[in-house]
Image: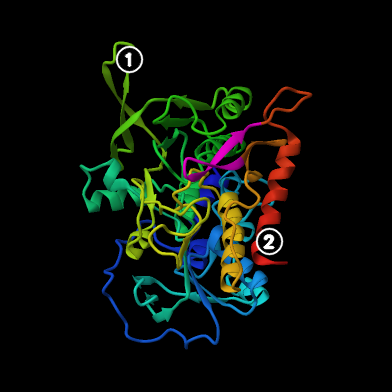
Amino acid sequence: MGLNRRDVLKVGGLSVVAAAIGGCGSLTQPEAPSKTQKTHMWLMPQPKGNRVVVVGGGFGGLALAKSVRQNNPESEVVVLERRDLFFSCPFSNTYLGELDDVDLGVLTRDYYGPAKEFGYRFVQCEVVGIDRAAKTVSTSLGDIEYDVLVLSPGIAYAYDQQFPQWDASKISRVAQEAPAAMIAGSEHLAFKRQLEQMDDGDVVITVPFGKYRCPPAPYERACMIAHYMEKEGIEGKVIILDAAKEPQAKAGAFKEAFNDLFKDRIVFVGEVKIKEVDVEAKEIVYTTEDESFTLKEHVLPYQVLNLIPQNKANPVIAMAGIETNAWGGAKLKGAGFVSVSDPSVYVVGDCVGHGIPASGQSANWAGKRAGKQIASRLGGKAVDEMVELPYKNANMCYSMVGADPEEAVMVTHEFVYENGMLVGKGFVPKDATSGKFRTTQLGRATREWYRGIMSDMFGV
């Protein structure tokens, strides 16, 4: 009997691709280095004018770097990023689902092209210390001085908080064997490889309570994986184990997609607490409560596990020593993005203390807005943090749920200033004709949005 496509993939895997993208980052998050660690070597000479140092080359950091240069060309902008290749988390679920024409080339970019086009500097390095008193950032390549520091480092995983009984070895093993694929880089490739090498059986996706990156992502991912399994003829289900009672984003829209498109494929189980994972036996143990509030323990075997743990702010935020909230996000002044602890430190992206969605679009919006404010400030102009607020459609988030034809659902957020912070008020539209949340028009809009935001950050 000859080899079928999945047999070939099991032999070949993604080894060539993984080698090409290996510099994207590790599966686990490193501990924050000591603040006192110094190289005593300057990364670059002092600038002739003002210097803005941006830590993090994601959707927020790159938008801000471009915005400052466009609005204040005299300022030097330097982006520090530990990865040597940009990998997009937004739209990556369509890669897992193998939608037409979606490959690694669609998700990846180099950092040097936009730096040259938009006039900022890019340095690949690791940030190992921040001295706010001296206004310097220490990196693996040397120290750099700043006039304004922007922190946009993204998230880290809080396995230790969600599973305090796990030691470092257990956390590392689970992170590799059941990759969360919520931080850009090699864990997406590891997850993709597992899907391509899987036998018949179930894919389990866990969704935590609390703040985590891109709330709709796990449910879009479930739809894309369900499509992939049907296309490949893989028998099994996609089982969502959610800490909440129903999907934590676009609930009505996703439940509609689950019922209409994948009724016999996707199973949603709410109000779940993950108790244990056995990667050797490929079993996950979780508990639920029955109507009498009695705990019931369940042992669920799986073929592939996508364990998404609780999120926390990247250790760089703590390294800066600025005031944070319980989640680790930076407390910010008013409706802006300035730290309450230091007027020279701005924060954009997923680590903000505002009540806005942790999404690529929100980070891009915040980066542009904060970039203009920094440029105005460096130019000696007054900054009005309330200008253009409330801001309609500040966040427009699309989720692909169907593949043949491509259909998507969306949510749009208006950002308003309430109770001392920016808050996102969401609306999930329905099609007036069909009465459905999902449409082919939104499927096309999903691709158009992604092409547009990537062009905005990286140029032609």
Quadrant in the picture for residue 391: top right
Any part of residue 439 in sight: yes
Residue, disc 2: 456
What predominant SS class does the magenta segment belong to?
A: strand
Q: Earlier in the sequence, mark 2 or mark 1?
A: 1
In the rendered image, the vertical position of residue 415 relative to residue 455, given as above or below: above
Disc 2 packing (10 Å; few <14; some 14–19; many ≥20): some
**Element under label 1?**
loop
Badge number at residue 290: 1
In the rendered image, the vertical position of residue 185 relative to residue 223, given as above or below: below
Asked if the stretch drawn in magenta spans residue 418, the answer is yes
Q: Which residues are magenta?
A: 414-428
Q: Quadrant of the N terminus?
A: top right
Quadrant in the picture for residue 375: bottom right
The residue closer to the viewer here, 339 or 258, is 339
Tell whether 427 sits left or right of 432. left
Q: From mark 2 to mark 1, how far is it between C-alphas? A: 50 Å
Q: Residue furthest top?
A: 292
- Amino acid identity at mark 2: Asp
The residue closer to the viewer here, 155 or 88, is 155
